[in-house]
Image (tube, rainbow, N blue to C red):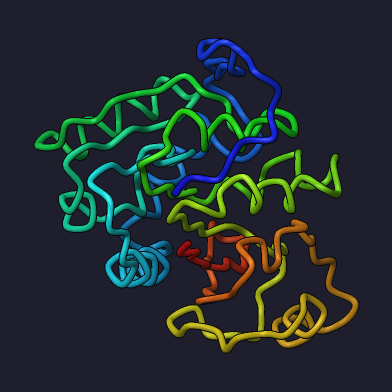
Amino acid sequence: MQAASTMPDAPANAYPKLRSHLFDDSGGVGYHLRALRHRHTLWAPFIAQVAGWLNAWQAPTAHLVIIGPSGGYALDEAFLERFARITVLEPDPLARLILSRRFPGLRIEHGELDCLSGREGPQWLARLYPGASLLFANVLGQSPALTEDPRWTDGLRAALHAHHWASWHDVLSAATPPLADTDRPLEPAADITTLATRCWRWPTEVCDHDSFGLVGRQDGLALWQLSSAQWQIVEWGAHAP
């Protein structure tokens, strides 16, 4: 049973809509160029770990909504084929084109909802896709909502508590190589400070993405070497109602 929404009554088409863009600090054209260069080399261990997470995720619905997949560089075709219907919420028009070309055998719909816009975005996501499983594809760690509104994460969990949903997202990043091995999953961490001190030593500057424990549980951690001078610690979590 779906939980009642706390949103005021509003027309079904009154939801916040994505604005197309090709350039972004964490995506866009620059990200596609990085993917072209590194997807089969530096990124390969991380992509393999994401594939393992996705294949183990038991999402029982026929409909999957993917939020922010970019060109789908870390998505696995065998995983996607489990769903009869796939909807993508992605603002980058080039990413949408790349995604469709990477998976030509899949019918992919493109939605307009900006579910990361303001406090009501997650509620709109639950309202518009009541029977779908939801996958946040490395987007929440870059969402301004997490830092601009301390209650946004709690609102996200409340809005989606009746859905099957999962996310992989950046929790830490640095321009200095970590102590961890990029080819091995990281051990679970009780808190962000423990994780940071396990992977780096002072005085390294480490960015906290305010997303640790975001789903409400931690089902995996991985190290991603994004480029020759950028490393991310990525968390995976999955929620079942």
Give the image location of residue 167, x and y in percent. 51, 57
Give the image location of residue 198, x and y in percent. 72, 87
Please give the name of the residue rendered at 64% of the width and 31% of the height, measured from the top-left corner: 121
Along the viewing direction, whichever of 52 and 225 lies nearer the viewer = 52
Along the viewing direction, whichever of 123 and 86 lies nearer the viewer = 123
Is residue 175 depicted above or below 218 in this figure? above
Q: Is residue 88 left or right of residue 189?
A: left
Is residue 28 depicted above or below 112 in this figure? below
Along the viewing direction, whichever of 181 and 59 lies nearer the viewer = 59
Is residue 190 depicted above or below 117 in this figure? below
Please give the name of the residue rendered at 45% of the width and 64% of the height, measured from the top-left corner: 240
Please give the name of the residue rendered at 62% of the width and 36% of the height, measured from the top-left corner: 5
Along the viewing direction, whichever of 21 and 119 lies nearer the viewer = 119
Res 210 quadrant in image: bottom right
Q: Is residue 52 left or right of residue 219?
A: left
Give the image location of residue 180, x and y in percent. 60, 85
Please give the name of the residue rendered at 60% of the width and 73% of the height, measured from the top-left corner: 217
Give the image location of residue 221, x and y in percent. 54, 76
Q: Is residue 180 left or right of residue 205?
A: left
Q: Residue furthest right?
A: 203
Res 15 quadrant in image: top right
The number of numbered badges drawn on the structure is 0
